Amino acid sequence: MNRNSLIAIAASAMLATPAFAETVIAVQPIGTVQIAAHHGAKSGHSMQATGAPEIKVQQSSSGTAYIAGGASVDVREAMEKRRSEFPLSVSVSACSGQYLVADRLSLSGPNGEFLSVTDAGPLVMTKPPASGQITAEATWKGQTQRKSFSANTKDTVNICFKA
């Protein structure tokens, strides 16, 4: 695949991520296109030369593995394919349905906080504690929302904000 093809793939990916109006694209020599929000957020994923996103597993400061991202449909679909590895899924959106990136998202279980992510979302997936109640707390533009749910939930938990 030549450089022009990689740039075309990157441009397509950029158009698919309207939440990131200012996007930085860097063509890597190994055929991977890196896409990251201009404001400095870590994208948590890259795009293979085939156009399929590669989701990178990240580690929180407490050692909890998670994946985050999902501004584009392709990335959300790639993340969903990893649902068996990361069965707890939390999305952040405006109550009108538009996906948002929370300033901070934290998840707490019976033994306290097990995940804290800045520039989180719009989708964050991780492994929950074995059982018990989980509380998700998200902050966006000075607003904080909390939601409690069972660690065994199979549904994506949505936290919405009034935009």
Image: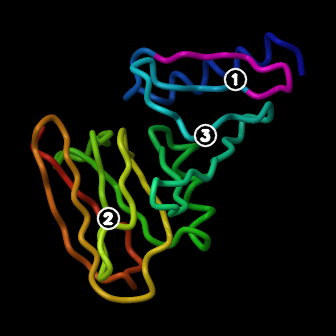
Of the two numbered discs 3 and 1 in the rendering, the one whose residue sits closer to the viewer = 3
Q: Which residues are magenta?
A: 23-32
Q: Residue at x 50, y 63 (%)?
A: 64
The residue at 66%/35% (across/down) is: 46
Q: Helix, strand or loop at disc 1?
A: helix
Direction bottom: furthest residue: 131
Q: Amino acid at mark 3?
A: His
- Taking the image as shown, residue 85 lies to the left or right of residue 116, namely right
State which quadrant residue 124 falls in.
bottom left
- Whole-angstrom CA distance, mark 2 to mark 3, is 22 Å
Disc 3 target residue:
45
The three-letter code of the residue at mark 2 reads Leu
Q: Which residue is mark 2?
A: 107
Q: Reading the chain from its start, which is encountered first: label 2 or label 3?
A: 3
User: Residue 139 appears at what percent x and percent y?
Assistant: 19, 46
Number of residues whose C-alpha sits closer than 10 Å to that of mark 1, classed few (under 14), some (14–19) or many (20 or more): some
Q: Residues within 10 Å of mark 3 (few under 14, many from 20)?
A: many
Disc 2: CA contacts within 10 A as few (<14), some (14-19) or many (>=20): many
With 85 as the anchor, is 122 left or right in this view? Answer: left
Please tell me the numbered disc located at residue 9: 1
- The mark that comes first in sequence, 3 or 1, is 1
The structure residue drawn at horizontal position 30% and vertical position 58%, both measured from the top left corner, is: 106
The disc label shown at residue 158, or none = none
x then y, percent, for residue 82 = 62, 63
Quadrant containing the C terminus in the rendered view = top left
Q: Which residue is nearer to you in this view: 151 or 77?
A: 151
Three-letter amino acid code at the position of disc 1 = Ile
